[in-house]
Amino acid sequence: MGDRWHVEVDRGVCIGSGMCATNAPEGFRLDSARQSHPKESETDANEEILAAAEGCPVEAITLTLLGSGEAVFPPED
């Protein structure tokens, strides 16, 4: 079994660019205020979700490993 991630969007940072929903439509949706929401707070690790997090212009998306809480994105300095 592969890694599982906790997906979170900081809606105080989100600017509603929609890049996450474009890059990973199965992982993110925009609400009526154009704020991003993960469709599931827990997901199997996958390239589309990672690309969405990396593509967010304001880094509003955080991915952490379930269980350990280790940062996946953004990486810890």
Image (spheres, grey):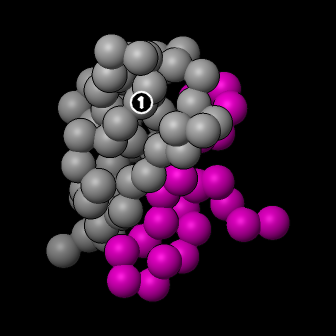
Q: Is 60 inside the magenta-drawn segment?
A: yes
When the figure is inspected, residue 9 is found, relative to residue 22, above or below; the finding is below
Q: Nearer the viewer, residue 22 or 10?
A: 10
Q: Is residue 65 left or right of residue 58?
A: left
Which part of the image, by quadrant, shows the C terminus? Answer: bottom right
Q: Identify the residue at image location x=35%, y=36%.
A: 37
Q: Residues within 10 Å of mark 1 (few under 14, many from 20)?
A: many
Location of residue 60 (image quadrant): top right
Residue designated by label 1:
36
- Taking the magenta stretch, the answer to whether it contains residue 65 is yes
Up/down of 47 relative to 55, above or below: below
Which residue shows up at 53% across the image and 53% down it?
Answer: 62
State whether residue 47 is above or below residue 35. below
Which residue occupies 37% across, 62% down?
6
Q: Give the x, y percent position of residue 74.
A: 64, 54
Residue 14 coordinates in the image, percent (x, y): 57, 31
Q: Could you say where residue 30 lies in the image, as x and y percent from the top left?
A: 35, 22
Identify the element where label 1 is drawn: strand
Visible in this render: residue 54? Answer: no
- The answer, for residue 72, to whether it is visible in the render is yes
What's under tag 1, amino acid-wise? Ser
In the visual, does 5 lie left or right of 15?
left
Q: Nearer the viewer, residue 50 or 32?
A: 32
Write the start and end of the magenta stretch as one range: 54-77
Count of numbered marks: 1
Give residue 22's quadrant in the image. Answer: top left
Instruction: Decide if residue 25 is on the left or right side of residue 72.
Output: left
Residue 76 image point, x, y percent: 72, 66
Instruction: Say if 72 sits above or below 13 in the image.
Output: below
